Image (cartoon, rainbow, N blue to C red):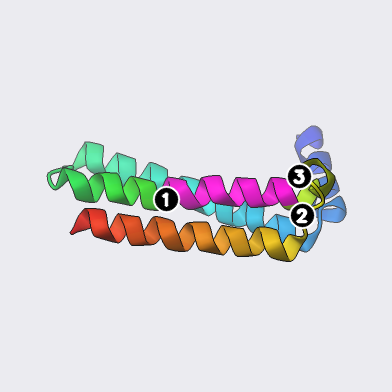
Amino acid sequence: MDILSGTWHKYRSKTPAAIQLLDAFAVFSGAMAALVFVYALSLSAHPYNAFISAIFACVGPLVFAVNLRMQMAQPREFGGISAERAFLSFLACNGLLFFIISSFVG
């Protein structure tokens, strides 16, 4: 238990607030994807395209958030991209994803 509390304290003190917010969003998106999957298993995934769209609506932003976190945490490895440009590409990718999802649902 001491290891977990030490790790949590170090994470809270050394990680910038913007990256902690991204981590919270990523955890939320992953939890929602798991909840949608459990719902489909327990009740029904009858409109299959709606189930697939819901999974993509949860997993897609999770992947984009992890990508944004990587670009913000280590900008030199991505060609020195600014945090503002990385966030703009995050928003553009999410907008395109949700347009495709809404088209897929019908």
Mark 3 — residue?
Answer: 78
**Relative image position of residue 102 (x, y in whole percent):** 28, 60
| Amino acid at the residue labelled 1 | Cys
Instruction: Determine whether the residue tagged by mark 2 lies in a helix, strand or loop.
Output: loop
Q: If you read the primary sequence from the N terminus, does the residue marked by circle 1 or circle 3 appear first? A: 1
Q: Is residue 97 magenta?
A: no
**Relative image position of residue 56 (x, y in whole percent):** 37, 47
Q: Is residue 85 left or right of residue 80?
A: left
| Amino acid at the residue labelled 2 | Ile
- Check if mark 3's residue and mark 2's residue have beta carbons within 8 Å: yes
Instruction: Determine whether the residue tagged by mark 3 lies in a helix, strand or loop.
Output: helix
Q: Quadrant of the C terminus?
A: bottom left
Select label 1 or label 3 by which is in front: 3
Q: CA distance from mark 1 to mark 2?
A: 26 Å
Nearest the viewer among 18 and 67 is 67
Q: What label does residue 105 carry, if any?
A: none
Asked which quadrant contains residue 97, the reply is bottom left
Mark 1 — residue?
Answer: 58
**Please, what is the dominant secondary structure of the magenta stretch?**
helix
Instruction: Determine whether the residue tagged by mark 1 lies in a helix, strand or loop.
Output: helix
Picture residue at 63% right of the left edge, 46% below the top: 67
Crowding around mark 2 (Cα neighbors within 10 Å: few <14, some 14 to 19, many 20+) is some
Q: If you read the primary sequence from the N terminus, does the residue marked by circle 1 or circle 2 appear first? A: 1
Q: Is residue 60 magenta?
A: yes
Crowding around mark 1 (Cα neighbors within 10 Å: few <14, some 14 to 19, many 20+) is many
Picture residue at 82% right of the left edge, 51% below the top: 80
In the picture shown, does residue 90 fall above or below 63?
A: below
Mark 2 — residue?
Answer: 81
- Check if mark 1's residue and mark 3's residue have beta carbons within 8 Å: no
Region rendered in magenta: 58-71
